[in-house]
Image (tube, grey):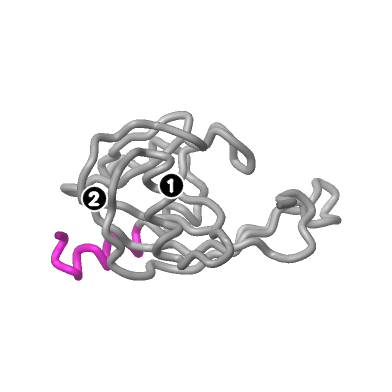
């Protein structure tokens, strides 16, 4: 699958996973945004539901099992060449609210590092502004669901 200069948008799925007031973040091992902290996630496979994709991606990147509670938001990630020309990346990102079910955190596959981060300290991680916003939306929904 061609990820750079695609002919159509690619569907990405991410999970905003909470455990005892902390949110799960991964340091991306591959482009786009390589080396930056982000939500665990990746591309949805053909024939795979959004929920199954989120559960699979979280497990591949962190070795954790999660339970999806609902949709937090849908975000477009569109990056153009520096001259503003061709679209280099175009992802439609479905961000889900989830809670930790089991497992000990361990970075794997596309994650260089994984960690539970206190929601109150997110500013020190220099996240993409949309990631910070989505975590806030998801946190409100998680609290509204009774913060399981």
The front one of 122 and 29 is 29
Q: Residue at x 29, y 59 (%)?
A: 98
Please tell me whether residue 31 is drawn above or below residue 12 in the rendered image.
above
- How many residues crowd mark 2 within 10 Å: few (<14), some (14–19), many (20+)? some
Q: Main secondary structure of the magenta part?
A: helix
The image shows residue 89 at horizontal and vertical percentages of 71, 53
The front one of 19 and 67 is 67
Say left or right for 52 vs 119: right
The image shows residue 112 at horizontal and vertical percentages of 48, 29
- Mark sitting on residue 103: none
- Label 1 belongs to which residue? 40
- Disc 1 and disc 2: Cα gap in Å? 13 Å
For label 1, the SS is loop
Task: Give the residues in magenta.
Answer: 136-148
- Mark sitting on residue 100: 2
Q: Residue at x 28, y 48 (%)?
A: 65
- How many residues crowd mark 1 within 10 Å: few (<14), some (14–19), many (20+)? many
Please tell me whether residue 87 is drawn above or below residue 144 in the rendered image.
above
The front one of 57 and 27 is 57
Please tell me whether residue 146 is drawn above or below residue 30 in the rendered image.
below
């Amino acid at each position: 699958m061609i990820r750079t200069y695609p002919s159509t948008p690619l569907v990405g799925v991410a999970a905003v996973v909470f455990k005892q007031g902390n949110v799960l973040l991964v340091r991306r091992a591959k482009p786009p945004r390589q080396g930056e902290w982000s939500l665990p996630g990746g591309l949805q496979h053909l024939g795979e539901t959004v929920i199954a994709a989120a559960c699979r991606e979280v497990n591949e990147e962190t070795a954790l099992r999660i339970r999806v509670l609902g949709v937090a938001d849908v975000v477009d990630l569109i990056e153009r060449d520096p001259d503003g020309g061709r679209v280099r990346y175009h992802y439609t990102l479905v961000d889900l609210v989830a809670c930790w079910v089991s497992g000990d955190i361990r970075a794997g596959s596309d994650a260089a590092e994984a960690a539970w981060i206190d929601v109150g300290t997110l500013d020190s991680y220099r996240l993409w502004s949309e990631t910070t916003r989505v975590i806030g939306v998801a946190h409100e929904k998680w609290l509204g669901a009774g913060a399981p």
